[in-house]
Image (cartoon, grey):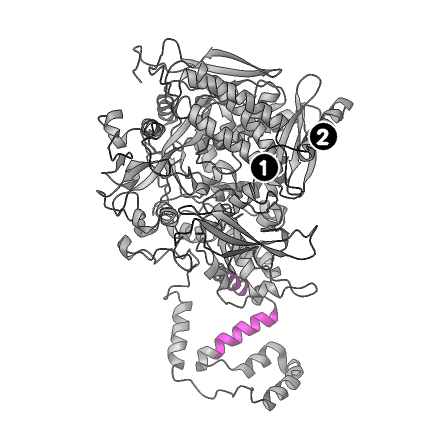
Amino acid sequence: VVVLSKGPVPGGATSVAGGVMQAAVDPSDSPDQHFHDTVLGGHYLNDQRLVRTFVNRAAEKVLDLERYGCAFDRRDDGSLDLRVPAGASRKRGIEGEVMSNVQKILAQRSLELGAAIFEYVMVTRLLQDEQGAVVGAVALDFARGDVVAFLSPVTILASGAVGRVYAVTACPRSSTGDGLALARRIGARMVNLEMMQFIPLAYAYPEFIRGFTLGEAPNYGKNTRFLNSQGERYMPGYDAARAEYATRDVAARANYVEIQAGRGSPHGGIWVDTSANDPLDGLYQPHKLADRYRMIVDFYGPAKANFEEPFEATPSALFLMGGVEIDSECSTSVPGLLAAGEVTGNLHGANRLGANALTEIQVFGAIAGERGAHLSREVRSPAVSPALRATIADERRALRVLRERPRGRRACDVKHEIQRLMWDRVGVVREGGRLQAALGELGRLRGVTREEVRVFSEVDRFNYDWVEAVEVSFMADVGEMMAAAALMRTESRGAHHRADHPQTDNQGWLKETVVRDDGGTLRLSTQPVRLTEISPPPLDATH
Amino acid sequence: LSGASRTLSVEIVRFDPERDAAARTVRYVVPREDGMVVADVLQHVYEHEAPDLGFLWECRTRRCGTCAVRMNDRPVLGCSEPAREGMRLAPLADLAVVRDLVVDRLGLRPRLAPWSGADSLATPLRVLERPAEIEEYRGLSECIDCFICDSVCPALKVNAPGRARFAGPRELIRTEAQIQRRAESMPWLGHAREGHLSLCTRCFACTEACPRDLRPMEAIGALTGRLFESGDLDSHKRAHIGTFLDSVRKGGWLDEFRLLVDVYGLVGVLRFVPQALVMLSRGKLPKPHLGTSPQGRQIGELLDALEKGALPRPSIATKREGTKTPHPSDTPLRSAHNPLNPVADSKRPED
């Protein structure tokens, strides 16, 4: 088994995740209850086959981690100390380990079992045989500055998050959606790529940390107020009953609209006024120097951290609910390719419940691994055919060209352009005309990433200029698919909000959007969502 | 950041061992931004001045350990360290430089599992169930492999080919974490023994520098204790510890002459005679302690109490304990100058 990681281990979105995992382990809870919460939270758009597999194996797979070396919070009597995650109807959140440590524990276990794990190796192309089956990958080993090829009877795509296609994101450096672009380029089917989850509050500055989560209103106490640049408290206009304490999709949308309408703070956020709160109240816990408090002191200073002054916050891109289409055994529409985790769709529907993502990677990571092991015994190891050799040479050449082009643009400049476009046009609130315009721009940017990007750094090792030159072509490919899917879904549901179609349409849109690349052209279609167990109540809900 | 200047200047030590004969210091000027951290400055230099600048970052939140650099000769995490006017950024000290600020953090296997995989699979893990043991374990397992402790360790500085190799605080805190999770402490004790713990000078540099407020030095102390109790120390070190304790217990003094004789034997001690003569001639030979020191009995009682478990053992949990203060206005805000100040974290946000 060979594991290729573009970033370091720990790294990727898991490494910065909160560390709560949903699993029905409490006597008052059950997989059925977990199923119900997940589908209701997902606005009935989840693939219920995936949800069923997920809830049935959640407890077993999360508790596996303890056998590998994790230590979850337990009470004095030794029982797990559970919390109630938002949207869950029972105590179901297992927590206590820093996720970066969980990654290290899993990596250690894999190494001990004989797997080879490579850091700083970025897959740039999936290899296919004559029948179209995936038989390996070409990768840029940028710790050494070398192009390498791997042949394998089974390939598992587990490349994670996509948040970095946006100008403001909670995701770490690596999360540029590479897996979705790789899947696109071999014609894999992808579902619900419009379903991007945003959080309401994140750092507005400095640049480096912009988009990193600042939690939600309740994290600061019971009297948190959001104000725009005119000093207006606008949340009651978006949700009269709950105002700042509305669900995170509603709060993210309101904050985005205020900022985009020019009523933002100096650093492009809104003001969070915490002056009516007691810092010692609730979850904030400055006396325990909780991470959140510490970071606010680091970046915004003690006066803001201690609630003496309001602070700035911006909504931020977090999680893609859609992705590569899989069945409950993690098979994709392409033979030889399995997929697991955030790169896949559609477990979470239109809105992912907090603490379900980390359970997802435990459950589907295990399934993909088991399935891959099984398949690799059935499938013969691929032979190095002349055609394969030619493809590898071709990819090697394409990667060299980026460094040898006589003139061109810095990849980081193009990256900022894509990120800004996605944030402004395919952001928290979408609209048909703007999406159409974005598609045109993304088409142009796809061209730029292929013809005009040039690597200016001449070094071989850790040449991030080279890495980014590849990343921008992935990001343009992914952005285009997301914009196309968002244009297709002419309704609002969960995280996807269309200003020109504000209603949820259960008659017409209990469907998945499907995107597939056919020789460079995107084929768009829809298919009914699999409602194998529960359906929405007959009346249309107003969004 | 202070002052009205709209720019900030920084010196970066740049070195590519494949191209350069020696490191050079390059000065850059970047626009100032509110709340700017070291990584902001480096990212700006990379995007606008030096596409080939070597530095790493991934998580932005003190978890991946890749952005550790030296700022004005002090090791820091670039993701959370405020930028300063005129700061000088260099790679962590005493580690192999890959390029510019990137140091060799080893491959994944030597970093995470330097012991034998077969041994490790054969030793069952146990589930930690008592909150106290979980807390202690986290004080070890939350190490982020930033290599800051290794970069400040004086014992690692004198490692050299052909001499006993000291494993260093980073590897040893990991080893102690493994032992706490296992039903049996072998083979990790063997691994610890090969790490030559006794070369640790107990200088506290690692524990003071740790950006996650862990206590690597105390972990090394715990490992030494395990080796002593298991009889898995060589005879010299056993005799050293045994005589040390016995001498202090009996008289409140450390009888250095007795220590030498017990550790090296009556014949073995003869090889120290030339050195002793030199010391004598310079007036440096310690005077023998006779009788019992004024606090002798009290010291003996303290040792007895420690052994019976009547006194708390030194903690290897994080330094966060005992730092909780009642109100934020009293809170010792983490100052960039003082790595001893608390980090921390209790309940984490959901995600």
Does residue A330 appear in this view? Answer: no
Residue at 53% x, 64% y is B224
Magenta span contains residue A239: no
Residue type of the residue flagged with mark 2: Arg
Q: Nearer the viewer, residue A215 or A254?
A: A254
Tell me if residue A409 comes above or below residue B218 in the rendering.
above
Residue B275 vertical position relative to residue A342 in the rendered view, above or below:
below
A427 lies left or right of A477: left
The label shown at residue A6 is 1
Q: Using the image as rendered, state which of residue B303 and residue A108 is in the foreground.
A: A108
Comparing labels 1 and 2, the label whose residue is closer to the camera = 2
Looking at the image, is A260 positioned above or below residue B72?
above
Quadrant including the N terminus of chain A: top right
Q: Chain of mark 1?
A: A
Q: Looking at numbered disc 1 in the image, what kind of residue is underneath it?
A: Lys
Magenta region, residue range: B220-247
Give the structural element (helix, strand or loop) at label 2. helix
Q: Quadrant of residue B231?
A: bottom right
Q: Which mark is residue A364?
A: none
Q: Which mark is residue A397?
A: 2
Q: Quadrant of residue A148?
A: top right
Q: Is residue B73 above or below residue A246?
A: below
> Quick one: B55 or B123, which is closer to the camera?
B55
* Residue at point 47%, 11% (across, down): A527
User: Residue A520 placed where, x, y %?
Assistant: 60, 17
Which secondary structure dominates the residues rendered in magenta? helix
In this view, the residue farthest toward the right is A386
Residue B20 % position (x, y)? 69, 53
Determine if marks 1 and 2 fall on one subunit.
Answer: yes
Rounded to the nearest whole Å, what is the CA distance between mark 1 and mark 2? Answer: 20 Å
Labels 1 & 2 near each other (Cβ < 8 A): no
